[in-house]
Image (cartoon, rainbow, N blue to C red):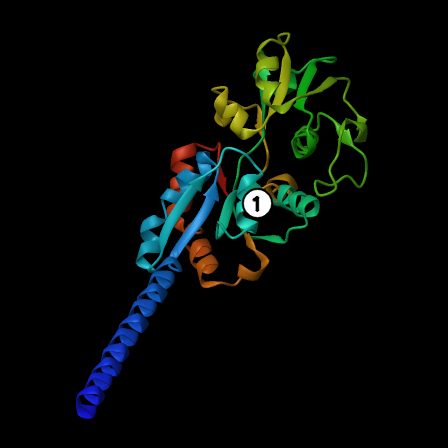
Amino acid sequence: MKKIVTSLLALTLVFALVLTGCGKKESSNSGNNSSSDDKTITVGASSTPHAEILEQIKDALADEGYTLKVVVYDDYVLPNTALNDGTLDANYFQHTPYLESFNASNNTDLVAVAKIHYEPFGIYGNGITDLKDLKDGATIIIPADDSNETRALFLLAQENLIKLADGSTVEKGVTTLDIVDDGGYNITAVQADTVAAQLKNADAGSIAVINGNYAIAAGLKIADALASEDASGEAAQTYANVVAVRKADVDSAKTKALVAALTTQKVKDYINDTYNGAVVPIF
């Protein structure tokens, strides 16, 4: 009888060890799933042109062993909050001044790792085809908000229509209060998304400075602009749209792979061929 009991105990012990071994194997599989997730690069982006540009690099990243997941946002806050909380690996929708402002307001530590493109501001006319024909007292409509106003005023200064105070810089920003010589023009600052409509309804001979996305939405082509931002100018460099990541991930393999894929001749050619100057590669 004792032999039978001993044998049963031995069998029970062997069975328990088998189950334990199975449990360890299942845990290992879970770890492999996590490793698979580590080969997915999740990037938040605006729909146009950012998400469209990202679509062009999926194959290049696949060749490097990564799956690119693009999450489209229609606002300028969620892509940064999602990046900060770890939902995203990177985002691509903003310029550095906006990123720095977001960091300051939200106590975050997001970092720009690459400049990819900029969307040039253009000067468009109502009944005028050359800036040299702009008459004294003509109305110049510009956007009134933060960086848009700065860019508009620097573009007007670039074309020698106005003069800004000595020491004015894009980085510090300017407003109409920084104009020391308005050239005799009536400079009117309005909400950025209304500039195109207000130009259309303005007196003949008026002009307006319109940023890229609003110009595209209004059916305006940068090729038809009377002037546009110089790609080598301070504004274009400062307001280039960037890839942003968490500070801890600046040198990560994912970040390096993403930036490498975005800064290729293929992407440069796609931008130039697709957007006809409304979006300009800056790498």
Write down the quadrant of residue 141 in the picture: top right
Near-viewer residue (233 or 188): 188
On the picture, is 262 further left or further right than 182? Answer: left
- Circle 1 Cα neighbour tier, 10 Å, few/some/many (<14 / 14–19 / ≥20): some
| 182 over 66 or under it: above or below | above
Near-viewer residue (171 or 184): 171
The count of marks equals 1
Give how far across and how far down residue 249 sits, in percent: 53, 60
| 221 over 233 or under it: above or below | above
Give how far across and how far down residue 118 sits, in percent: 54, 39
Q: Identify the residue at the far front of this view.
A: 1
Q: Residue at x 57, y 18 (%)?
A: 196
Give how far across and how far down residue 39 sits, in percent: 37, 59
Instruction: Let me know if residue 283 appears in the view.
Output: no
Instruction: Let me know if residue 106 appears in the view.
Output: yes
Write down the quadrant of residue 178 in the picture: top right
Near-viewer residue (197 or 265): 197
Q: Identify the residue at the far bottom of this view.
A: 3
Q: Residue at x 41, y 53 (%)?
A: 41
Near-viewer residue (125 or 200): 200
Badge 1 element? helix
Q: Quadrant of the N terminus?
A: bottom left
Give how far across and how far down residue 16 sits, in percent: 27, 77
| 248 over 227 or under it: above or below | below
Q: Residue at x 59, y 58 (%)?
A: 247
Q: Which residue is mark 1?
A: 81
| 244 over 33 or under it: above or below | above
On the picture, is 9 further left or further right than 263? Answer: left
Residue type at numbered disc 1: Thr
